[in-house]
Amino acid sequence: MRLIVAISGASGAVYGIRALQALRELGIETHLVLTSAALETIRLETDYRKTGIERLATQTHRIDDITSKLASGSFHTEGMLVIPCSMKTLAGIATGYSDNLLLRAADVTLKERRRLVLVVRETPLSLIHLENMVKVTAAGAIVLPAMPAFYTRPKTVDEIVDQIVGRSLDLLGMANHISAGWKGPRKERINDRS
Ligand SMILES: Cc1cc2nc3c(=O)[nH]c(=O)nc-3n(C[C@H](O)[C@H](O)[C@H](O)COP(=O)(O)O)c2cc1C
């Protein structure tokens, strides 16, 4: 199993880092692309540095290396995860404006009819953002907003992060137990109501 993982410069770099850790634990081959804005959010939001994140991936590809194997459909992958996905990167994917390796790899993933999951993060959303989400969905991508649920009663930020990461890997067909899904109401809550 082989997956492209891209981290762009939206808030929530921790989602991308956790996804790389989880995929490593699952034994999935990962090909990482980091944008220059992602390096800023990683620095501002986490204690990680570029090399520490690169070590989590099987291979890292330079964002400006358009000669990378990720730029060709002949390099087979199970799909691509952009986590988190900025509105700028979303716009590039929606319009097919592939001027960096992340955008080209996403374009290739769509043209090859492979799974593309975009963990978008912005709030509030403008009409431009919403229209771009419609465009990529029509082209076959899955938009998974970094929008955690609270029915699992998360106790830590890690649990909240894991929920989004677990769902995104589910959508890529990567079986995982990172986060427990909804299993119906708790027994004690049913009792409380009786
Ligand atoms: C701390 C920080 C947080 C940001 N958060 C977001 C965000 O949540 N969503 C977003 O679309 N852009 C966000 N941005 C802006 C993007 O980083 C910026 O648009 C950048 O050009 C995106 O480039 P990229 O898509 O190539 O990574 C943030 C920037 C910084 C510095």
Image: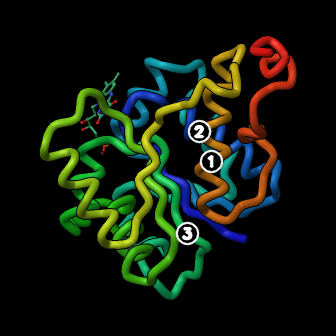
Q: Which residue is mark 1?
A: 167
Name the kind of residue labelled 1 in the image.
Arg
Q: Quadrant of residue 166?
A: top right
Q: Which residue is mark 3?
A: 79
Q: Quadrant of the C terminus?
A: top right
**Left or right of residue 135: residue 162:** right
Q: Quadrant of the N terminus?
A: bottom right
**Left or right of residue 91: residue 79:** right
The image shows residue 115 at horizontal and vertical percentages of 51, 70
Name the kind of residue labelled 2 in the image.
Ile
Q: Earlier in the sequence, mark 3 or mark 2?
A: 3
For image coordinates 66% across by 51% down, the residue present is 57
Classify mark 3: helix, strand or loop.
strand
Q: Residues within 10 Å of mark 3 (few under 14, many from 20)?
A: many
Q: Which residue is mark 2?
A: 164
Vertical side of 51 occupied by 113: above or below: below
Q: Residues within 10 Å of mark 2 (few under 14, many from 20)?
A: many
The image shows residue 94 at horizontal and vertical percentages of 24, 62
Labels 1, 3: front one: 1
For ligand 1, tell me if the residue under mark 3 lies within 8 Å. Answer: no
The image shows residue 103 at horizontal and vertical percentages of 33, 62
Vertical side of 156 occupied by 19: above or below: below
